[in-house]
Amino acid sequence: MRTYKTLTWDDRLKIAAWQRVGIKVTEIAKLLGVHYSTIYRELKRGQYEHTNTDLITEMRYSPDISQEKKEMYLRAKGAELKIGHDRAFAEFVEYMIRVEKYSPGAVLGEIKRRGLVFDTMVSKPTLYRYIDQGIFLTITNKNLPIKRNKKESNYKRVVAKKAQRGTSIEKRPPEIAARISFGHWEMDCVEGAKGTKGTLLVLTERLTRYEIIRKMKDKTAASVVKALNGIEREYGTALFRVLFQTITVDNGTEFSDVVGIEMSMRGKKQRTTTYYCHPYCSWERGSNENQNRMVRRHYPKGCDFDPVTPAEIRKLEKWINNYPREMFNWYSSADLFQTHIDRLLSA
């Protein structure tokens, strides 16, 4: 388990001394064994305005100011909390939400999944309440994913009469919509900033919510087919046909090459079946839409995907697939996907 360290008075004195001699924040973090963001927050907490002899003002760091603020905070908040005397739990929650970008529920699920033991445990509503009340030192509700109202809307969903191209979703077998069988995917693109070309191709397996992400040089039909060919090479043609029995997409021009998507790069035999949603009905790819929100936690709208490396994409993919899911009793998509793969290989 990772060590979560609270800065002490001695640490604050060291930070002040090291900063005076020009040591960088990242190096100070390494010397103290903490994340660099901890040092940035510490410097902000102890910040004050200093006026030089030439009457020029500058912002400086005071360990005394920072220590006083923390002690005042603990006196004000400590007595009312279940977690007031369990800093290990509080720091684990802060780290998982701030650095790993987990939701409060996912943090509690990860504790359960990994069998971690703390002096204190709280319920999900209580944890949300603590965050909303500003109880934690390093996180606020601004660090949380956007809360969605789960209440059903009163509007009626209206679909167009038919899909624009390919086989309509209306012809998709009902068991796929019911999520009772494995090997049926949704596919979409996540675009970068306006004026850039780099795009992410994202595929979501409907039963397990397992995610495959590939960076493309642009949002074109040719790039989509090239990315799918790469996935076929990775898994092998025989396994690809079993894993990717169907793929549901929208009517974007990037998915217009039906033949290229469906036909194998080897022997030109069919490798999958594609179904097209009704125009303007993104909710027909609900899994994709939800997963795209997870992508946006790391790459917000307006970011440029051009400089993003394959290693960074793999890290994002791994984060999504290992994220604990309440719908799966806090197992991850990777756990469930591997179970189905093992069944296929042993059959």
Image (cartoon, rainbow, N blue to C red):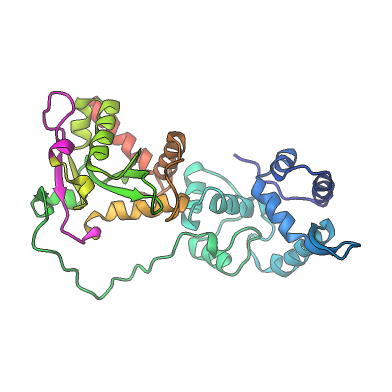
Q: Position of residue 36 (x, y in %)?
A: 66, 46
Magenta segment, prevailing SS (helix, strand or loop): loop
x%, y% of residue 102?
49, 52
The relative height of residue 93 versus residue 219 in the rendered view (above or below) is below
Q: For this view, does 140 lie left or right of residue 39? A: left
Residue 317 is left or right of residue 183, and the answer is right
User: Does the stretch in magenta take in 283?
Assistant: no
Pick the quarter of the image with the C terminus.
top left
Above or below — where is 69 with respect to 288? below
- Residue 315 appears at what percent x and percent y? 46, 38
Q: Quadrant of residue 320?
A: top left
Please state the total of marks drawn on the protein image.
0
Residue 177 left/right relative to 121 = left
Residue bounds of the magenta highlight: 259-282
Q: Residue furthest bottom?
A: 154
Q: Is residue 206 visible?
A: no
Give the residue displayed 70% in from the left and 65% down from the top: 78
- The residue furthest right is 53
Residue drawn at point x = 18 percent, y = 32 percent = 241
**On-image quarter of the N terminus:** top right
24 above or below 297? above
Which one is nearer the viewer's eye here, 118 or 167?
167
Q: Is residue 18 left or right of residue 140?
A: right
Residue 253 seen in render? yes
Which image quadrant for residue 204? top left
Tell me where residue 146 appears, x and y as whole percent. Answer: 44, 63
Foreground of the two, 313 or 304: 304
